[in-house]
Image (cartoon, rainbow, N blue to C red):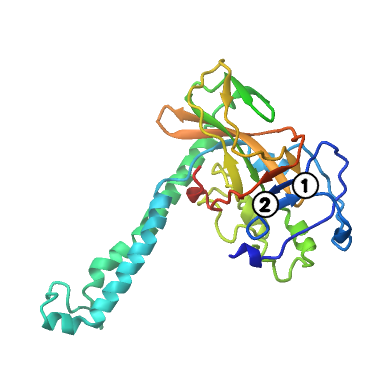
Amino acid sequence: MEPRNVPVSEIVVDVNDDSLRNFKIGTDDGWFVQWRDFSDEDAGKLHLECEISDTTPEFLTRSRMGWFVNPDPLHNISRRLIKPTVVLLIVSLFVHAIEPGLVEYGIIGTIVAGSVTIGPLEYPRLLFYTFPLFLLPLLFRTIANFRDIARQSSIARTPYQDPKFSIHIDRDTSEVTIGEIDIGISLSRARIQVGVPIPERSTLLASLGRNEGGQPSPGLSTKLPDKRVSPGDEIGAGVGESTPMQSTSKKSVILEPLRIMSHGSWTYDIDVGSPFKLTLPEGQWPGSVYSSLIAIHWEIMIEFVGTDGKKIMWVSPVIMPHSKTDTVIEVAPVISGRAELSNF
């Protein structure tokens, strides 16, 4: 999708917080998010009554707080195999089409040439070598999904005790002290990350003059009914799976990526009871703010290692104070909407 061809969603809101400064992430010819003062040219835009808050809303604490794990590595391997296996299958069909000439000139032998008769039909012999390879991505994906479900069930069945920690964060530094952790896990590393959550679907449609039940706006699919699958899929912004297979009866333990997101470097020298500092993401990001169209969300991620050697992460929102000046980030750090590709 070319961002310059996508309509810009704009609304006018009343802000009663003098500490909230203007900010812009990205540029007008790419993906961008902007918060600016009202001007005369904005008079015809949709005026929306919505709450502007610096307190993390419930839908984010529900979906982005708690224990999370990385998707199984086989998901990534499966995706990388799709292109070469499809090319291999197409090449094998092309070779079969020109097979008589290749046999005549001695380029291929009878081991791969000809057909195999099964019942009333004949199948190219070459496909018996290439088609199993073509199915490898599907096999790996299935195995990875079963592993993910098993891991989620295990965590839900015997959950770890939530870590107790305190954090002091300001515009320049962040200091964390972890007071207590579960005896079955050990500290590994930690970092701070910030991103832009998905806007509320109703606000997005209203700002573009569209109605629910009609044609969705670019970037949105039809809203799924009834049961929640994941934050992106529920509102129709995921356009397919945002996370790999997950248990539908329990909270997902695979963290869905924010589409615009940045993070500080990992800090490895961490111990229980000892204060440590975390590096903030590059650039002067805005402070925490939540509205129905634009939200800036900060969170801390602490990674642990269990007795079985598997990694598990605790994620918790943090509130970053607002900057005293307007902030600009020239390039929006857009990442993949799929959890296994977003470099968690």
Q: CA distance from mark 2 to mark 1?
A: 11 Å
**Front in this rendered view, residue 267 or 19:** 19
Q: Position of residue 48 (x, y in %)?
A: 85, 55
Left or right: 126, with 171 as reference point: left
User: Residue drawn at (64%, 64%), measured in percent from left and top?
Assistant: 4
Q: Which residue is mark 2?
A: 198
For mark 2, give the secondary structure: loop
Mark 2 or mark 1: which comes first in sequence?
A: 2
| Amino acid on which disc 1 is placed | Ser
Q: Which mark is on residue 291?
A: 1
In the displayed structure, 88 sits above or below 320; it is below
Left or right: 286, with 12 as reference point: left
Q: Position of residue 1 (x, y in %)?
A: 58, 65
**Circle 2 Cα neighbour tier, 10 Å, few/some/many (<14 / 14–19 / ≥20):** some
**Circle 1 Cα neighbour tier, 10 Å, few/some/many (<14 / 14–19 / ≥20):** some
User: Residue drawn at (77%, 47%), measured in percent from left and top?
Assistant: 291
User: Residue drawn at (73%, 41%), measured in percent from left and top?
Assistant: 58
Q: Which image quarter: residue 201? A: bottom right
| Amino acid on which disc 2 is placed | Ile
Q: Position of residue 242 (x, y in %)?
A: 56, 53
Q: Which mark is on residue 173?
A: none
Asked whether residue 143 is in view, the answer is: no
User: Residue drawn at (55%, 50%), measured in percent from left and top?
Assistant: 335
Q: Which image quarter: residue 180? A: top right
**Front in this rendered view, residue 313 or 177:** 177
For mark 1, give the secondary structure: loop
